[in-house]
Image (cartoon, rainbow, N blue to C red):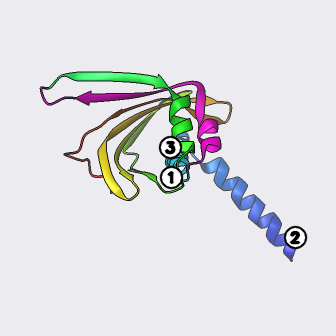
Amino acid sequence: MRTLLLIIGTLLSTTSLRAQTAEDSVRAAVASLFTAMRQADAQTLTSLFHDSARLGTVTQDASGHTSHRSSPIAGFIAYVGQLSPGVADERARVERVLIDGSLALAWTPYQFYVQGSFSHCGVNLIQLVRSGAQWRILAITDTRRKTPCPDIF
């Protein structure tokens, strides 16, 4: 009986893996990013990013001047990895996924909290590339502001 249950469980999990769409797998990769951030798990974060990944931020000052800064992802991973679990909580919703072959784009409105207190909000534009069977994050560019915040629920 135990063997039969194990076989049925394996078949069901294999079937559900085959049924997962490319969009589902992109959404899962993005969800893994936010979970790893919450858990301050640098090892998982490292596995989610492409070796040449970059992190970018687009901001606008009070006079309306727009600026962009970009940096290698290693600094972000090191920063998150030194936090205690639960300190960084990015609450996000994958609103849209676009895919063309091995390239994907996820649009994710978010609200960011540090130790339970609101910090900022905006939208992440997450670019992913398929590497074998895994989607890996190639770049994240975000906007940052205090208000108005996008609806994430």
**In this rendering, position of residue 95 left or right of residue 9:** left
Residue 136 location (% of width, % of height): 58, 33
Packing grade of label 2 (10 A; few <14, some 14-19, many >=20) is: few
Q: Amino acid at mark 3?
A: Val
Q: Nearer the viewer, mark 1 or mark 2?
A: 1
Q: Quadrant of residue 4?
A: bottom right
Q: Which mark is residue 38?
A: 1
Q: Nearer the viewer, mark 3 or mark 1?
A: 1
Give the mark nearer the N terminus: 2 vs 3: 2
Q: Amino acid at mark 1?
A: Arg
Magenta-colored stretch includes residue 57: yes
Q: Amino acid at mark 2?
A: Thr
Write the start and end of the magenta stretch as one range: 40-63
- Identify the residue at image location x=51%, y=47%: 37
Residue 112 location (% of width, % of height): 36, 48
Label 1 – label 2 distance at C-alpha: 37 Å
When the figure is inspected, residue 73 is found, relative to residue 82, above or below; the finding is: above
Label 2 – label 3 distance at C-alpha: 35 Å
Give the mark nearer the N terminus: 1 vs 2: 2
Q: Which mark is residue 30?
A: 3
Q: Secondary structure at mark 2?
A: helix
Magenta-colored stretch includes residue 95: no
Q: Nearer the viewer, mark 2 or mark 3?
A: 3
Give the mark nearer the N terminus: 3 vs 1: 3
